[in-house]
Amino acid sequence: MEQTERRVGTVSRGIRCPIIREGDDLAAIVTESVLAAAESDGFALRDRDVISLTESIVARAQGNYCSVQNIADDVRAKLGGGTVGVIFPILSRNRFAICLRGIAMGCKKVVLMLSYPSDEVGNELVSLDKIDAAGVNPYSDILSLEKYRELFGENKHEFTGVDYVEYYGNLVRECGAECEIIFANQAKTILNYTDCVLNCDIHTRARTKRILLANGAKIVCGLDDIMNAPIDGSGCNEKYGLLGSNKSTEDKVKLFPRECKPLVLDIQARVLAATGKHVEVMVYGDGAFKDPKGKIWELADPVVSPAFTDGLIGTPNELKLKYLADNDYKDLSGEALKKAISDSIKAKNDNLVGNMASQGTTPRQLTDLIGSLCDLTSGSGDKGTPVVLVQGYFDNYTN
């Protein structure tokens, strides 16, 4: 009997799960939830399906939390408790404001240096049009708070309605520290104010540390150096510290999950035992999506995926169908075109870098691509689907 042609390519499904609490057997819960969804919705698992789970349920199951007091104690111990330059933080109540409370509690004075016109992930302090109109050069010009207000006044965030300059300043003072706010984009600027610096950038942190140390800073810590070991029995993240953390309560932070490769391997093994299928499994945080209207990048986590099975190592190796159709096989149509393109896919090399027929297929990491798909599928609100099943991702036109 002739096999019918598959008419569906990649499918991304949000999988509903129970609310996860500290100490839960996450591998069992995820496996059972995926198998129950397959049974209830009438689909079957296949080899190379991808089961993805949000970093937040992993951290919750691990109980990976710390308090603002833990942060304060660590900051004081590592940066001396005097005047500390806190530079390049992102503008976020969820991501950074709670960390700033702990930082301020561990200092006498905070010199808060904000990048402008926007933070690292695109949250705008002031528009580029206003910068241009004021004749300001953001690369070289250093603005005091007074100068910033004189030039630009109050600027509330488009989505949250918060004036982060005022919000962060008030927050530091409420925690008992003095606060001076400046606006600059060169890391070494902070050394005019203090030689003890906490750089809070995410993806540029290694360069920032290098520049500060080369220009005479006495102490430099990144957010990845704070809470990288337990304080009084707290959670921690040995690799990323406070990076990737989220507000849990008014005085508690959920940290990025700790080592979780054993978890993804456990889920993979359980699914194999239950179904005979070899699936891939990954933990994902923020995808890398830029909002066209607000200009905000989603990527506030240090990586999209902190753990994944080995089948997700690497980048796609794909041909561009429209290139083949418009160039190599422009004189073909119908079944002849379909056969020619299918034959090209079946005969493609394992490495298509530089091949004209692969142009436009940007070689991004599989985990970044799939993690972004999963982040958009699960959302960040009340969908209740912290696990996402992706099927058919590794299919091509010939499957």
Image: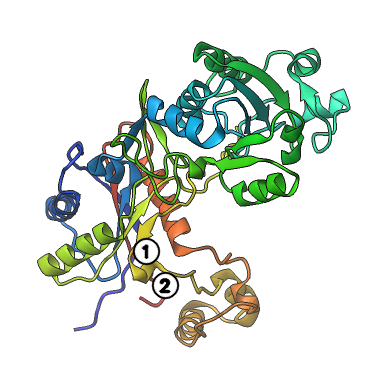
Residue located farthest toward the right when viewing the structure as drawn:
135
Q: Is residue 167 above or below residue 6?
A: above
Q: Is residue 364 left or right of residue 4?
A: right
Q: Nearer the viewer, residue 143 or 17?
A: 143
Instruction: Tell me if label 1 and label 2 are in contact, CB under 8 Å.
Output: no
Q: Earlier in the sequence, mark 1 or mark 2?
A: 1
Q: Position of residue 87 (x, y in %)?
A: 64, 33
**What crowding class fits label 1: few (fewer than 14 Cα within 10 Å), some (14-19), or many (20 or more)?**
few
Q: Residue under circle 1?
A: 9
Secondary element under disc 1, as helix, strand or loop, is: loop
Q: Residue at x 44, y 85 (%)?
A: 346
**What crowding class fits label 2: few (fewer than 14 Cα within 10 Å), some (14-19), or many (20 or more)?**
some
Q: Quadrant of the C terminus?
A: bottom left
Q: Residue under circle 2?
A: 396
Using the rendered view, name the quadrant where residue 111 is placed. top right
Q: Position of residue 388 (x, y in %)?
A: 30, 50
Q: Nearer the viewer, residue 91 or 130?
A: 91
Name the residue type under label 1. Gly
Name the residue type under label 2. Asn
